[in-house]
Amino acid sequence: MVNFASFCKIKPTISLTDFTQEEKRNVWLQDHESILIRQHCQQLVEEVEKYGERQNSTDDGDDDKDTDTIRGLERLMKSETRQWGAYRIIALEEVLWEQEEQYSQGYHDDEAIAAVYSSVTSECQVRAELIAVQDRKEVETYLSDVM
């Protein structure tokens, strides 16, 4: 279900080319901020790999707990990195083998190359779709709780 706001509000802003250097620094992440974010993400992944997901009590007086999660950071996990790397290598090898075979036979077939690539990456596609379905369920549950 799609909902639109009942009214429209316009907020004037200036073009990026009109920003002062200070305004640009305040708007964009600085290198040290990016580094801190990456370090925090890596630390979170390492803790989850070691201890599993953890619960943090909030200080907002609410009885709910915040859960640290690595959603979106899966590729940083060692097990995921190994698996992703294996798929990448296998796909590359299959494509190179197909290209070599075609070259030795004296023809070129883009569709055949795409097919061997898809034969490896289709499992990744199915996995991504399953994650998307789970994400959608979680969003719907969250929205039904807050509305």
Image: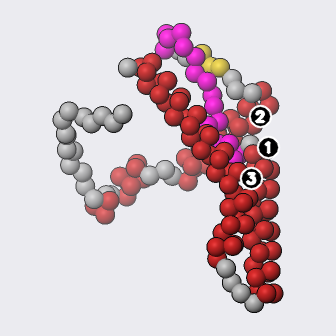
Q: Are marks 1 and 3 in contact (CB under 8 Å)?
A: no
- What is the secondary structure assignment of the residue under circle 1? helix
User: Looking at the picture, does residue 119 appear above or below residue 11?
Assistant: below
Determine crowd level at label 1: few under 14, some 14-19, many 20+ residues with C-alpha closer than 10 A.
few
Say if 95 sits above or below 85 in the image.
below
- Residue 66 falls within the magenta-colored stretch: yes
Q: Amino acid at mark 2?
A: Glu
- The residue segment tinted magenta is 60-76
- Spot occupied by residue 37 in the image (x, y as percentages of width and height): 59, 43
The residue lying at 19 percent from left, 40 percent from top is 9
Q: Nearer the viewer, residue 57 or 18?
A: 57
Query: For the point 74% across and 32% down, which residue is it?
Result: 47
Which numbered circle lies on residue 79? 1
Helix, strand or loop under label 2: helix
Read off the residue under disc 2.
49
In the picture, the disc for residue 58 is none
Whichever of callouts 2 and 3 sits on the residue coming sooner in the sequence is 2
Is residue 36 in view?
A: no
Mark 2 is surrounded, within 10 Å at the Cα level, by few (under 14), some (14 to 19) or many (20 or more) other residues, namely some
